[in-house]
Image (spheres, rainbow, N blue to C red):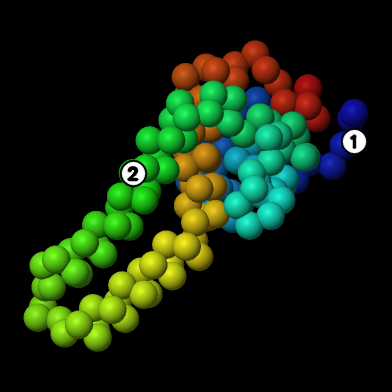
Amino acid sequence: MMFETQMNPHPANSSPPLKTLLWRGWCKKCPQCGEGPLYHRWLRLYDNCPKCGLKYLPDQGDLFGPLLFLDRALFLIPLIVIFFFRPWNLNLTAALILAGILLGLLVFTMPNRNGLSLAFDYHLRRKGGDLAGKNPPGKK
Ligand SMILES: [Zn+2]
């Protein structure tokens, strides 16, 4: 297809920079084309990108798992700190409010952070040559 609309401003044969990939992930978009959605409901991941066909999790649990775990851990640490160490002499009400905000953020940004992990995983796959030789559809 010579005149296929191509939103991707980068040359077809080079991977976008990591920050672009991560931004796409955060926006819940396919890291490869930046157009296809990652989810079809709140947290239901598509198997493949509806736009470019990228398989999101070729080896489920390979990297995605540890990344997600790290992600959760990073969010849980402040909670633990708030309740067990009570820095700044927080009173319980303030601690509860803070914890509520953190938990809210934890849940609310979950798809975004999952997307980040996925984009990072994709970045590593590209670097590792996992996707080498597999030209995505729509790109020669
Ligand atoms: Zn895509």
Q: Quadrant of the N terminus?
A: top right
Q: Residue 130 at x, y = what percent?
A: 55, 18
Q: Residue 127 at x, y = what percent?
A: 48, 23
Image point (90%, 36%), residue name: 3
Residue carrying label 1: 3
Badge 1 amino acid: Phe
Image point (58%, 49%), residue name: 24
Image point (64%, 48%), residue name: 44
Q: Is residue 8 left or right of residue 98?
A: right
Mark-to-mark CA distance, 1 and 2: 43 Å
Residue carrying label 2: 70
Q: Does the CB distance between marks 1 and 2 fall below 8 Å?
A: no
Q: Is mark 2 within 8 Å of ligand 1?
A: no
Neighbor class of circle 2 (other Cα within 10 Å; few <14, some 14-19, many 20+) is few
Considering only order in the chain, which callout, 2 or 1, is on the residue closer to the N terminus? 1
Q: Name the foreground residue: 100 vs 10.
A: 100
